[in-house]
Amino acid sequence: MATDRFEEIVDSVSSVVLGKKPQIRLALTCFFAGGHLLIEDMPGIGKTSLAKVLAKSLGLAFHRVQFTSDMLPGDILGVSVFEQKTSRFHFHPGPVFTQVLLVDEINRGMPKTQSALLEAMEEGQVTIEGKTRLLDPPFFVIATQNPLEYAGTFPLPESQVDRFLMRITVGYPDRIAEKSILTNGGMQKELSGVKPCITKNEVLEIQQQIRRVHLSDRFLDYLQDIIQYTRSSHHFYAGLSPRAGIALSMAARSWAYMKGREYVIPEDLKAVLWHVAGHRLRNERDRTEFNESKLVAMFSEVPVPL
């Protein structure tokens, strides 16, 4: 039943974002695991369209923010404005008060503005002028950044990167998908026809069910072996943290649930491992990121418990 529901959402999203079902499944895995998603790719690939159609298919409110170097934290969180008629300050909520927040080119914002998202992403709330305001669950941040442009950008600090449960790339469309895109002149026409496949209450219930997916001792041994490998191997500048371990377990639970299982197996971890761990690990030699094939090959050296 769970598998059929997920595939219905995947089909809905893929009717707009053509030829990208693997990326859509990963994005849904991240969302239902209760995490946030970082999409790193070139402009014009369809990152914004993916975020918009995900929100529509899930029946959730959506806001988009374009980060720039002159953006202030108040532009995201909101500000209090004095109104002469009432002689009081009235709070005007910013775009963070939504359910799916697309942050385009997050690395073009100043570090102070980037950090304004930290509390929202970690705790589902924001503190403005000494008052804490809760965000309406589910709260899902999709942030994009371009890996090729460095002029005028501010690389995300490790504390910010670690808030993203998963990172994916969308990639160029295949020839058949691109032909359809060229014929129709883009994705906006298809986007207008997308209908919600699920209700907000159903989303929250699924997220609770995923937290109850069983983690066996065998799986936990394998997960801990993976984590320990990153801490003891000379290949890594720093190993995976306990928070990263939690992220791996939640992503594996979500993937298993999407596959219709109430328990996690090592293959579920392998399916999400690169997307959860890749942006958290650096090469000891020059502190650069590993490419996917290299990191997957390294993790294959960790034996799967019998």
Image: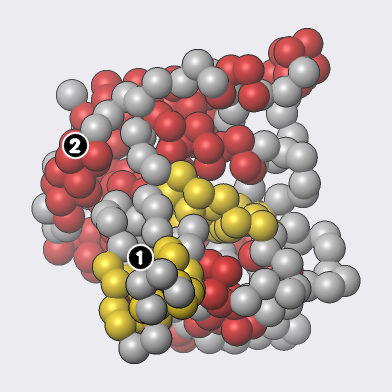
The three-letter code of the residue at mark 1 reads Ala
Q: Name the residue under label 2.
A: 202
Residues tagged 1 and 2 counted as in contact (Cβ below 8 A):
no
In the image, residue 128 above or below residue 33: below
Residue at the (73%, 13%) spot, across then down: 184
Residue 295, position as x, y percentages in the image: 59, 62
Please indicate, yes or no, whether residue 80 appears anywhere in the rendered image: no
Q: Which mark is residue 247?
A: 1
Q: Nearer the viewer, residue 116 or 281?
A: 116
Q: What element carries label 1?
A: helix
Q: Is residue 190 above or below residue 55?
A: above
Q: Distance between the residues labelled 1 and 2?
A: 22 Å
The location of residue 108, given as percent across then percent down, is 73, 69
Which sits earlier in the primary sequence, circle 1 or circle 2?
2
Quadrant assignment, res 92: bottom left
Circle 1 packing at 10 Å, graded few (<14), some (14-19), many (20+), is: many
Q: In this view, does 263 lie to the left or right of 278?
A: left
Camera sees residue 100: yes
Q: Mark 2 belongs to which amino acid?
A: Glu
Whole-percent x, y for residue 273 in the image: 45, 57
